[in-house]
Amino acid sequence: MSSGSPALIWTPIDTLANARNLATAAVGSGLVACANVIGPMESHYVWKGQMQSSMEYGVLFKLDARTLDAAVSLVEELHTYDVPVVIGWLADRAPTATLAFLANGLD
């Protein structure tokens, strides 16, 4: 089995149930190998010109870089926010076994 490069996606979301649903859908799509639901966490941001704060959950997705664009699009599409923050990036390194895990089902 060959493997690509590691990649990650991060997004905050409003509730534990929505975080779990997003994680399950992304992993179930085959585009993402693993998703970690993190939180709750306190977020501070400016929205529509006003300082805001809220409790959110973070979802960290781990995947093969070959599916990064499609996975970012999926997370954005399934997200419950009108304007979700979805950030995907290439990771620099991962051990061979991790790369194989991330590529599972792609080759």
Image (cartoon, rainbow, N blue to C red):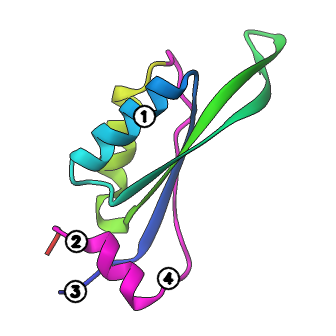
As shown in the figure, which amino acid type bears the numbered disc 1? Arg
Residue 96 magenta: yes
Q: How many marks?
A: 4
Say whether disc 3 or disc 1 marks the residue closer to the N-terminus.
3
Secondary structure of the residue carrying tag 4 is loop
- 39 relative to 65, above or below: above
> On residue 9, which mark appears?
none
- x%, y% of residue 57? 61, 33
**Toward the viewer: 64 or 57?**
57
Q: Is there CB contact under 8 Å for labels 2 and 4?
A: no
Q: CA distance from mark 4 to mark 3?
A: 14 Å
Disc 3 designates what residue?
A: 2
- x%, y% of residue 25? 29, 38
Q: Residue at x 32, y 55 (%)?
A: 32
As shown in the figure, which amino acid type bears the numbered disc 4? Ala
Between disc 3 and disc 1, the foreground one is 1
- 99 relative to 38, above or below: below
Q: CA distance from mark 2 to mark 1?
A: 22 Å
> Can you say which quadrant of the picture contains the C terminus?
bottom left
| Residues shaded magenta | 81-105
Disc 1 designates what residue?
A: 20
Disc 2 designates what residue?
A: 104
Q: Residues within 10 Å of mark 2 (few under 14, many from 20)?
A: some
Say whether disc 2 or disc 1 marks the residue closer to the N-terminus.
1
Q: Residue at x 37, y 86 (%)?
A: 97
